[in-house]
Amino acid sequence: MYSTTKPSCKHIFRSKKSYINCNKRRFIIKRPILVAVIGYILGILWGLYFEISIAPFYIPIIVIYLFKKTKIFNKSKKSKNFKLFSFKRYLRYLKLFIKFKIILIIIIFSTISNSIVLYQNKKYEILYQEKDIQLIGKIVSNKEEKEYSDVYKLKIIKSGDTNKFKNTKIYLRIKKTNGTQLEYGDIVKVEGIFEKPSKQRNEGGFDYSQYLKTIQIYGTVEVKNIEILNKENNIFTLANTVNLKIKEKIFRIFPEKEASIIQGLLLGDVSKIEEDIQENFRTSSIIHILAVSGMHVSYIIIGIHFLFSKILGKKATNILSIIFLLIYMFITGFSPSIVRAVIMGIIGVLSKLIYRRTDIYTSMAISLFIILFYNPFLIVNIGLQLSYLGTIGIIVFQKNVFNFIKRFKYKSKFIKYRIKENTVKIMEKFEEMLAVTISAQLVILPVMLVHFNYLGIYFLITNILASCIIGPILIFSILIVMISIINFRISKIFSYLVLIGIKLLIIISEFGQIPFAKLYVATPKMWQIVVYYIILILLNNFCLIKIKKNLNYTQIRLKNLLQVLKFKIRENKKKFKVVIILFVFIISTFRIMPKSLEINFIDVGQGDSTFIITPCNKTILIDGGGSLSNSFDVGEKTLLPFILDKGYTKIDTIIISHFDQDHIRTEYLQ
């Protein structure tokens, strides 16, 4: 017997609601690795910024979870009056995340990562107490030439008579007058003085000790005596040898200026690129192409499939791609961006081999977990932050941005009806590149402002132009290096094609020299960053409501909420105007209200500089510091970041006490 009674509207409403809530639960619970990584990151950040155990602070969370089980969360009334903004109405979204499995995973992994960070910090502090040091270690880097000394990275095998610092890495500084030349893999006995790395000297300034932790370096030893004991050969030594051979080939094939850029593109090594060229790449917002990342991995996979898929078949080509990616990761030195890209690339290729669909969020979570498990301090690495946030931006926003651009384009009847089909396809490719660039930049913008304090005005133009030529440059550069192993003359002939692309890339980077290419911005506060991301998420949902046809329940609710809000504003226009005027008045009053006098003495090395903020919010700079060395600009590297971190982009008054080099750079007055 079949029931002929129709289900009530209320029943349908509840079924739809439970279905959507179930989907949201699946998004979280089906990705336990993602939840684990969120907990792992939470524990790392807690250990870095609070330097205490996180375990005692889980007691309130457990209390909240138990509180959730009470009637307050599950209480329902028979008759409900609609409220535009209701805490209880939207509290149910929190219930999707407050699940026992999720809380347990977060507690376990955050406690583990927090314990690792606290243990590592103690290990650093113990080594910082050392002065005269004797150790045996292995050289794990090539020589880095400085003005008066050579610097090597050393992995400690034995320290004195103990093994407590085993596998710890330090820098060795050897004076050029010593004459000792070391190679990767050398086992050496060292006597010297340990130098503790400097910490942040000014508010918002560069923290050298924190930076060294991101590359697992504990400090520097000024070498007194050194003796080479042996040489160790392993897979890392072989990878380093291959790296050096590739660099040697690049500089033989190409002129020095172009070769340094190709070395950066292929291997991520920018040490040979001139500082002014690097600055142009930064200002024009294309510096990311010199960091080996997902773009390089995707072109490698495309290139291998193009060359070998017809010869070897799809399965063998996919296996070859995985092998090549692993070799490439070893050769380029395991930078965070390349590790992320290679792991995600390998997961993507493996999914094709086993005929399983990949989940992009899980792939990202796995790669991030591996990186942070290896070194939790990499969470503050700028390259890692930009790499992951840029990828998230493309995943979340690219489709909506593309649809928005496409919708805007077709309002033009000329574009819609008169342009040829081939031209339309080219325009669609252009729109896709534009959407990818905008999506990534939207998410990484706060990070760029926090670390660099400026906006590249022409970033859209430079990124699109660079995207058009970077693919052929990478693919042809790899092929030319491979051909040079067989026949150097043929590789030299084909090198002119790559040189044209590099010349164009340099021209694109020179957009950074155009007037107003760089706009300095004060460092945003944490609350401003949070508000920015909330607005970004809301705008993304508004775009979905405008563009998407089949909306889910939450999006329908948001659409209805917007309509109610518009109706309320129209109904109470005068009241809303009064509220806005009062809000603007209050904000303006807070800005003009007298503040306390603030005097900041800036550490500029040998010299003086004082930054004063008056009660009327006027700024006074007394001296700007200076340096006898032309290689370090105190004003650009120390003074400007400090003032921007204080929230100011201009100085009202500058006072110069006298014209010594340690108080002001006299060439600025000429």
Image (tube, grey):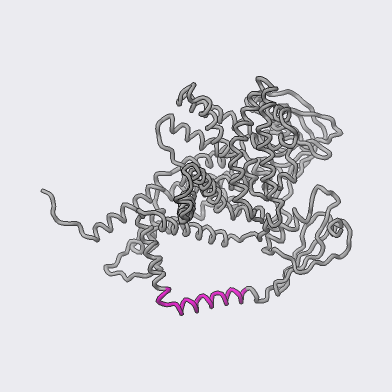
Q: Quadrant of residue 90?
A: bottom left
Residue 573 sits above or below residue 40 on the image: below
In the picture as drawn, the residue positioned furthest to the front comes out as 418
In the picture as drawn, the residue positioned furthest to the top comes out as 486
Front-most of residues 127 and 629: 629
Front-most of residues 385 and 539: 539
Front-most of residues 172 and 491: 491
Q: Any magenta on residue 372?
A: no
Q: Is residue 518 left or right of residue 401?
A: right
Q: Look at the magenta stretch and give its main secondary structure.
A: helix
In the rendered structure, which segment of residues is drawn in magenta? 569-590
x, y percent for residue 494: 66, 28
- Can residue 138 be seen at all in this image of the molecule? no
- Counting the numbered discs, the total is 0
x, y percent for residue 490: 67, 23
Residue 545 sits above or below residue 172 on the image: below
Q: Quadrant of residue 603?
A: bottom right
Q: Any magenta on residue 584?
A: yes
x, y percent for residue 157: 68, 31
Q: Is residue 572 left or right of residue 142?
A: left
Q: Is residue 354 left or right of residue 55?
A: left
Q: Is residue 361 left or right of residue 249?
A: left
For image coordinates 63% across by 73% down, the residue present is: 591
- Can residue 507 be seen at all in this image of the molecule? yes
